[in-house]
Each structure stands twice: as structure tokens, then as C-alpha cells.
Image (cartoon, rainbow, N blue to C red):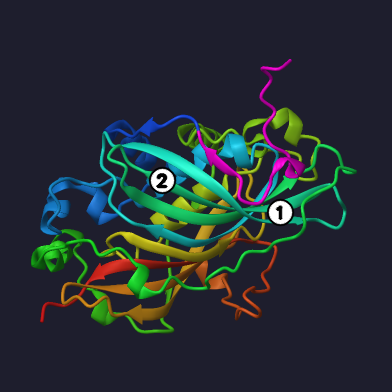
Amino acid sequence: MGKSRSGNYFEDFRMGMRMRHATPRTLTEGDRSLYIGLTGSRAALYTAATNAGLAGLERRPLEDLLVFNTAFGKTVPDISLNAVANLGYSDVRFLAHVYADDTLAVESEVIGLKENSNRKSGVVYVRSTATNQSGLDVLTWIRWVMVHKRDPAAPCAATVIPPLVPVVAPSRLARHLYTASVQDICMTTGVTDLWDDYEVGERIDHCAAMTVNDSDHSIATRLYQNTAKAHFDGFVMASTPGGQRLVYGGHIISICKALSYDGLENALSILAVNGGSHVNPTYAGDTISCATMVLDKLDLASDKIGGLRLRTIGAKNIRGAAEIEFHSLEGGRAEHRSNVVLDLDYTIAIPRIAQ
């Protein structure tokens, strides 16, 4: 029985607790191909080596969200194996490109704890960081997750809610060394819209929608080695209110990012996720649509690229993205309809018009 791995429950976490997650993972070109097969991603920088060359990179990097979801999956056995749900993200920063054959290792620290009033669960806040085989930090993020208690009567640590930055400041964003020819990427996408052509407050209704098949989300959660019961164990989830496994939220983010290609064709890398929440659950058979609003245009002190702060809302089982409503954020949260599954605030790099 001592070798039975049941994961941590809420009462097992302590402030400052550090975890080195097993086991490092080498990503390959096979992972890239499978990611495209699961999401339909067409992101220019990651689709063709020639596009990466135009940007001044020696090789095609791997898709940012493939890296994020893989690193996230490493944290699950220690943090969210017994999760009720992943609740949100903050201060997610993509610090360096990751390439095929790079090996990722991930460590986390508990930075906040809050027991729920029903005493059956609590919220755990963690800061996680992924490094490559050279020890270089490539990704860091904060997330908070609701975790079951093993024993509702178990005493828990005092409440600590960490301060969360609402927006990653431009000075903290990675500066990728793109070359002047990065503006020529529009010749390969066939679309000329660059940083200068977007306006704050502009709304983009993405034309496509994607149905989440049971096989797709099952393969995705295995690709990321995300062993959370909510995504893995249909027998356990049959007794929950939803009656079936939840689609991993990171897969929904990836789908919305892939769908947002239409209207953001010349986007390069994701620089940061400022905040995000999985508003309502997604299940197999749901069809996802999304719309994006430009929240801000960021000067990255470069004549080659600029930053766009975007808010993408994903909704399920609607007639089209035009039905999505962008409610204002009151106290950091928005009121959403029950068909909204994702509200994501993130920052991308995009070429500027040559000066």
C-alpha cells in the first residue's frame, strides 16, 4: 500500500512547498504533427521552416501552447490529480522558444491556499516554471486549482491569497530577436494586416467552429500526460453532475487559438497570458466558436514587431461567433452566459509595417 500514488489532497499542501515534477519530457516533431492533428493549428511561425527563416530563426520553434500544455501536464500528478477544476491563470510568460528535441523539466511552488466554506475542498495557488536541457527558463506561470480534501474534518493552513498582476507589463515580456524580414511573412499568409492595422476596441469574429470529439480530447490529455481524473476517468466522472469526463481546459485554449488564425494570420508567438478562466465546462460533442477583441497595442521598443493584448472568448454550441458578448470586467471578473467556456486575456507579437 505504501507504493500507491493517490496524489495530494488539499490538506497535504503547505505554503512554500516545492515540487520537482516527474519526469522530464523531450518534445519531438511527432508531437508537433499530433498537435496540428488535434487542433488544426495554422500558425505561420510554426507551420513552415521557411516562415521561421523569414523571422530570423534558424529552426521552427514548437507551438507555444504545445509547450504550455506539456509543461502543465507535468504538474498534474502532484497538484491537480484530485482536482475539482482548474480555475484560472495569471502571469504566464513565454520566455524562450522551444524546439524539437528540447527536453522540458518543471518545478512548482505553493504560493497560496484557501479552504472552501464547505470544507470539502480548497483552492491551491502555484507558481510553476519549465526549463530546457540547458537549464534555461522557457516558461513560467501561476495557476489556481480547486482540489478535493481527503477528509473534510482535516485542519488546513491559514488562508493566503497571493497578489496577482492583472497584466504582464511590456518590460517583462520576452524580446525575441526577429530580423527585418519578419514583415515579409505576410507574403506567405496572403494577408497584409500587421500591428499598425489593428485598433484598440476592434472586434474580430472568427469564422470557423470546431466540434470536440471524444477521441480528440482523450488523445490530447494523453499527449500532455495530464492524468487528472476529471479528464482520464470516465467511470469516476459518471457520478458527477456533468455525468462524463471534462475536456481539459488547455485543449480548449489551443482550439480557440487555432480558430483565431482567421483575422490574426500574421501573429507570431504568444508572449504572455495575462489572465484566463474556464468559465463553464466543455464535454465531448460540444462545438466551440470564438471571437477576439483588441484590448491594447503595446510598443515593444522595436521597429520590427509590436504587441497586441487580446481578449478571446470561446463559447459552445452557438450559431456563430457574432452571438458572443464581451461583458465588461467588474472586479476582474465578467458575467457570462452558461455557453461561454473560456475568457482569455493574452499578448502576442506581430510584425510592424517596415519604417
Horizontal side of 15 relative to 59 (left or right) equals: right
Would you say residue 249 is visible in this rendering?
yes
| Dot 2 amino acid type | Ala
Q: Nearer the viewer, residue 145 or 63?
A: 145
Callout 1: SS: strand
Q: What is the C-alpha distance between the residues marked 2 and 1? A: 22 Å
What is the crowding at mark 1: few (fewer than 14 residues within 10 Å), some, or many (at least 20)? many
Task: Farthest residue to the right: give it.
Answer: 153
Q: Could you say where residue 171 lies in the image, as x and y percent from the top left?
A: 34, 73
Q: Residue at x 30, y 59 (%)?
A: 269
> Looking at the image, is mark 2 or mark 1 earlier in the sequence?
1
The answer to whether 169 appears left or right of 61 in the picture is: right
Tag 2 and tag 1, C-beta contact below 8 Å: no
Tag 1: residue type? Val
Numbered label tally = 2
Q: Quadrant of residue 334?
A: bottom right
Placement of 120 over or under 351, stated as above or below: above
Q: Which residue is mark 2?
A: 130
* Rendered location of residue 205, percent (x, y): 44, 70
Name the residue nearer the viewer: 339 or 154: 154
Residue at the far front in the pictured view: 16
| Residue identifier under label 1 | 123
Look at the image and say whether residue 16 sits in the magenta stretch.
yes
Query: Can you give x and y, in whole percent of width and height, for residue 209 in the image?
Result: 48, 56
x and y percent of residue 20 in the render? Answer: 50, 37
The numbered dot on residue 148 is none
Q: Quadrant of the N terminus?
A: top right
Whether the magenta-drawn stretch holds residue 221 is answered as: no
Q: Is residue 211 visible?
A: no
Residue 296, quarter of the rendered image: bottom left
**Where are the magenta residues, as a range?**
1-21
